[in-house]
Image: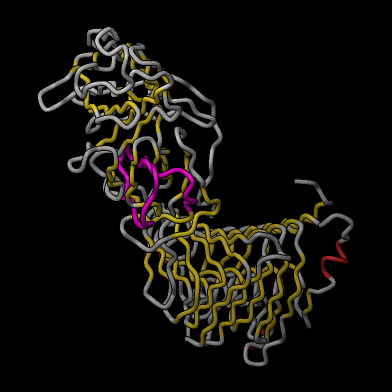
Amino acid sequence: MKRSKKHLLRSLAVAMIVCAGFAACTQDDESGSTTLPEGKYPLEISSVTMSVESSEQPWGTSPTPQTRVSENPDGNSSKWEDGDKIYVQVGSGTLGTYTYQGGKLTVADGDSPAYWASNADGQTVKAWHTSPNHTSGDGTTTTVTLSDQKDGLAYVLTNSAPVTANFGQSIDLKFSHALAKIRVVLTGKEVGDDTSVSIESYTSCTVNQVTVQGTTPGEIKMRRTAKGTFEANVVPGYEIKQFKINDGNWIDLTTSVTPVAGNWHKIGIDVKPEALTPAEPIEIKDNGEYTITGSGTNSIQITGGSPKVTLSNVSIANAPGIIISGKDTQPTLYFKETNSIEGNVEYAAGIQLKDGASVTIEGEGEDKTTLKIDMAGALACGIGANFNESGESAGGNITIKNINLIITSISTGIGAGENATCGDILIENSKLNITLQPNNTAAIGASVSNFNSPSVCRNITIRDSDITAKTGYSEGYKAEASVIGTSGSPNAGTKCGNINIWLKQGQSVDDFKENLTTTKAQAIGNGFWELRGDPNKATTGTITFHPYAAN
C-alpha cells in the first residue's frame, strides 16, 4: 500500500505592515559618549512584516483562530493576532517587549520598549515571537512545547536576517517562520471524525533570540483542521520517518520527509483496515475493502454486500474455507501470491456458494498468483454450490480471472455439486488444473443427480485459458461425466447451458482439448450413463468454439 508522498510546491509571500507609535529619539544629549543611559532612548520600529517565503507550499488554512499567530482564510499565509508578543533586542541591551493590538505595535501593561544602549554605528537588532508565549526567564532564551498541538499550533517567528542599524535610525523588522509545517492528509473509508494522527519529531525547541534548536525526539500530536487533515509545526531539519493513527503502533513512511523552515510539507496516507487472519473468525457483510493474510482454521464468512477482499498468502485448513451466502451477496476475492484451502469435511466446498450468492475470483496473473483447493470430504466440490444446494439455496454466478487455479475434489471442480444448481461460469486468462475422483462429476459444470433432484449449471464461457482435467468411469454409477459440461444421469433435469470457448492466440480446437481426458463421455458436453440399462438423459446446450479475439 502507498502510504505517503511529499509534494514540492510553489512559493508565496504575504506581508502585513504595522506602524509603531513611538517618538523618534535624538542624539543631542550624549554626543560625546558611546555608552548611553539605560532606558532613555527607545528604538523606533517603523514597520513589522510577516513573510512566508517558501520553496514548497505556504501555510494552509485553519477553520478557527489559533492561540496567537493564525492562518489566513485563503489557506496561503499566516497573520498576527491581537495580543501577540514581539521581543526585540538592540545589541546586548535590555530586552524589549511589544504587543500587537489593533493593527499596530503597542507597549501594553507589563511591556517595555527596547532602548539604544550605545550611540555607535552598525548595531544589530534582533527580534522574535513565540506562540505560546514564554512565561519565564528573561525572554532571550525560552522553550516552546511542540508535543501536543491538538488544540493549537505552535509558532516561532524571527527576523532571521538581523537588522544592522545606526543609533537613532528607524528600522523595519521582517519576520519569517522558523518552524516548518507538516500536513498529513488521510484518505480511505476508515477515516472518521474521531481519527487522530501523531508524527515523530522534536517534542520541544529552545529559542535563543533568533536561533531555534530541537531537544528530544518523540511523539507530536497533530491538530485536526478538517476531516482527514492534520497539521503540526516542527523543528526543521529533523527527518520524519514514521507516524501513528489513533494511538496505534508506529508505522514507517514509504518516503521520509525532511522539513524546511518556512515551508509546509504534505504527507498523503491511504488508510486501510488492519489485515484480518483466519486464525480468528471472520465475517464480512458490507461493501467494504478487507485484507486477509496468514493461516488458520477458521472459515471466512461473507454474508452480505459486494466487498472487495484481498487475500495474500492465505492458508485455510478448514472446509468450507470461504462461505458466501445471500441472494445479493457478490464479493470479489483478489488473491495475491500463493494461497491454499484444504479440508476433509463431508459436503463442504473450498469456496461455497449458498442462497443465490455469486463470486468473482481474481489474481494478478496466472504466472503470479496461485490458489490451491484440496477438498477430500465426501461429495465436496472445489468452488460452487455443494450437495443439495438447489432451488432457493442455489449458488449464483462464478467468475474466475487471471489466476493459476489447482483443484482436487471429490465432487465438481467448479460449478454445481451433487443435486445442486449454480449460475453462469466465466473463466478468463487463467490456467486450471483439476483432479477428480472417478465419481461421475464434471470438472467444470454439473455433477450427478440423485433422488430425482436435478444438478444444473447455466452457461459456461471460457476465454484465453488453459485447462487440464480428467474424469473417470465410475463403477458405482456405471457412468462418467464430461470434463466441461454435465455428468451422466438418467434424470432429464441434469443439464448445462451453452458452452462458448474463445481460443488463445495460435491455439486450435484440438490444442484446447488436448489436456481434457475422458474414457466414455464427451470431453465437452454430455456425460455417459448405463446403470440398469437406463439411457443418459443429461443435456448440454450448444457448444461453440471461437477464434482468438483480442480483448
Whether residue 104 is situated above or below residue 419 in the rendered picture: above
Please tell me which residue lies in front, 352 or 38. Answer: 38
User: Is any part of residue 391 visible from this angle?
Assistant: no
218 on left or right of 148: right
Please tell me which residue lies in front, 139 or 235. Answer: 139
Looking at the picture, how far across and down is residue 410, in whole percent? 59, 84
Whether residue 13 is situated above or below residue 437 in the rendered picture: above
Q: Residue furthest front?
A: 32
Please tell me which residue lies in front, 541 or 299. Answer: 299
Could you tell me how many numbered marks the image carries? 0
- Region rendered in magenta: 212-240
Looking at the picture, how far across and down is residue 81, in whole percent? 24, 23
Q: Residue furthest bottom?
A: 475
Please tell me which residue lies in front, 437 or 310. Answer: 310
| Residue 545 counted in the magenta span | no
Looking at the picture, how far across and down is residue 253, in whole percent? 50, 54
Looking at the picture, how far across and down is residue 402, in whole percent? 68, 60
Q: Quadrant of residue 123?
A: top left
497 on left or right of 265: right
User: Is any part of residue 332 visible from this angle?
Assistant: yes
